[in-house]
């Protein structure tokens, strides 16, 4: 899919929605990809190419090296868009991280899946008793 994305052109084969960080394939783009892959239907549920293609095109058109991620120790490391700090243990979901790894030619790691998540507030509510301490209280 990463190789196919190299043959596609912006505004010809796909449109970029930068606000939502999404891409939309055009009719011409769909036809071009089907011709390259030699398949009749990209959306065939028995042989689904479309999620891989969309991730590869997103990785190519929306995510840039040294802006959204860096390559460090032969791995893709995400850069926080607000602070500019690197986040070594974070990964993009829905195959996007693997698409960026394929684009950069680094070894592709297995996709991880979040089993559950909880906010700190709800996590602390699981305990029967809570206590706190302040460093700014007035002493008598």
Image: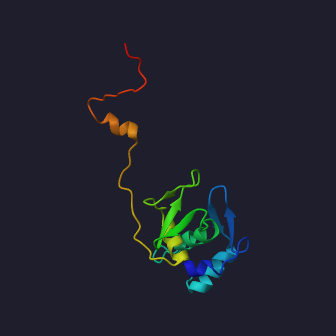
Viewport quadrant of the C terminus: top left
- In this figure, which colouring scheme has been used for the structure? rainbow
Name which residue lies at 46% across and 61% down: 91
Q: Position of residue 16 (x, y in %)?
A: 68, 64
Q: Nearer the viewer, residue 22 or 71?
A: 71
Q: Residue furthest front?
A: 140
Q: Position of residue 20 (x, y in %)?
A: 63, 56
From where the camera sits, is residue 27 visible? Answer: yes
Placement of 129 over or under 33, stated as above or below: above
Q: Residue furthest left?
A: 128
Name which residue lies at 51% across and 76% down: 102
From where the camera sits, is residue 43 visible? Answer: no
Name which residue lies at 43% across and 24% down: 136
Placement of 70 over or under 135, stated as above or below: below
Residue 126's image quarter?
Answer: top left
Residue 73's image quarter?
Answer: bottom left
Q: Position of residue 69 (x, y in %)?
A: 55, 64
Q: Nearer the viewer, residue 30 or 66?
A: 66
Placement of 119 over or under 78, stated as above or below: above
């Amino acid at each position: 899919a990463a190789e196919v994305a190299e043959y596609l052109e912006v505004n010809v084969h796909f449109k970029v929605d930068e606000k939502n960080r999404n891409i939309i394939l055009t009719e011409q783009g769909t036809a071009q990809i089907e011709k390259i892959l030699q398949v009749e239907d990209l959306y065939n549920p028995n042989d689904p190419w479309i999620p891989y293609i969309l991730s590869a095109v997103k990785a190519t058109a929306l995510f840039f090296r040294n802006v959204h991620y860096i390559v460090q120790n032969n791995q893709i490391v995400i850069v926080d868009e607000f602070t500019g700090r690197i986040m070594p243990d974070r990964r993009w979901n829905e195959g996007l991280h693997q698409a960026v790894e394929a684009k950069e030619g680094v070894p592709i790691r297995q996709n991880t899946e979040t089993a559950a998540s909880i906010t700190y507030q709800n996590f602390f509510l699981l305990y029967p008793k809570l206590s706190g301490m302040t460093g700014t209280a007035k002493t008598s």
